[in-house]
Image (cartoon, rainbow, N blue to C red):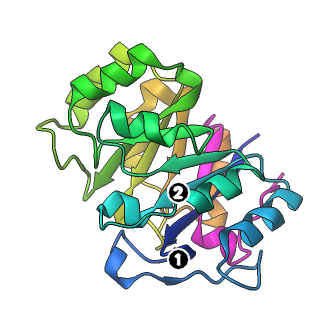
Amino acid sequence: MLEIIPVIDLMNSVAVSGKSGNRSEYTPLKTIYASSANPVEIASSLKLAGAKEMYIADLNFIERDGSHNINEINDVNRILPVIADIGVDNLNTFEFALKYAYKIIVATETLESIDELKKIFEKYPKERIIVSVDVKNNELLAKHMDIDLEGFKEVLHEIDPNEIILLDISSVGTEGGFNKELLQIFSDFKDKIILGGGITPDEIDEISNMGIKKALVGTALHKGEIRINEF
């Protein structure tokens, strides 16, 4: 059975929506799960709908613009276990985030180095860590590392994480369908994959039949096109 993990992005204390990672164009989220863009209200409703955990990206923290939504993440974590992306770049940032959420994302987009990734895995249990393979235009999105998809696959085989997010940034918010090519490249890790980016209602059965256990869904979920309990 495929677990649907609800996704929200936070900016300036409210949930926001946008397309393809263009964060300057994000607007307050409109969702069937709440009458406002308040993350606590949304989380409470999602829990009643059957959500088991929730993915939250703190866009302010990721951009390092001097503000954050860490208190809102902490509030939601009391309602639903939060998978938090705050733009972890090194061990210190990871340790900070652990105080506020159940699982912390270490994403290629913001990671400082492979050494820092290994330090995190050496010090903390795998149950608290999710590695996010961020891709844009079918290339690994890694601002601080000189590594491609195949190179990062080798790193993943070495550290052997429990869960790996495959996130096509180009597809976020588009409902254009998941990246089948990316999934094929990482087929070795099928049992660990959390699939994200542009998933449509028609693809839910297909993804489940592939053996994928979890999927990140934002836009289609908040529109009511995909439900938490699809099965």
Indicate whether residue 111 is drawn in magenta.
no
* Three-letter amino acid code at the position of disc 1: Val
Indicate whether residue 224 is drawn in magenta.
yes
Task: Tell me where the magenta segment starts and ends, as one range.
Answer: 210-231
Q: Is residue 172 left or right of residue 24?
A: right
* Three-letter amino acid code at the position of disc 2: Ile
Q: Position of residue 122 (x, y in %)?
A: 39, 14
Dot 1: element: strand
Q: Is residue 176 left or right of residue 4?
A: left
Residue at 49%, 42% (x, y): give it. 97
Residue 167 visible in the displayed image: yes
Q: Position of residue 38 (x, y in %)?
A: 67, 76
Q: Give the position of the N terminus as an image quadrant.
A: top right
Residue at numbered disc 1: 16
Residue at numbered disc 2: 70
Q: Is residue 28 left or right of residue 205?
A: left
Check the image and name the residue furthest to the right: 48
Q: Disc 1, disc 2: CB below 8 Å?
A: no
Q: Position of residue 114 (x, y in %)?
A: 23, 27
20 or 198, which lies in front?
20
Q: Position of residue 45 (x, y in %)?
A: 82, 67
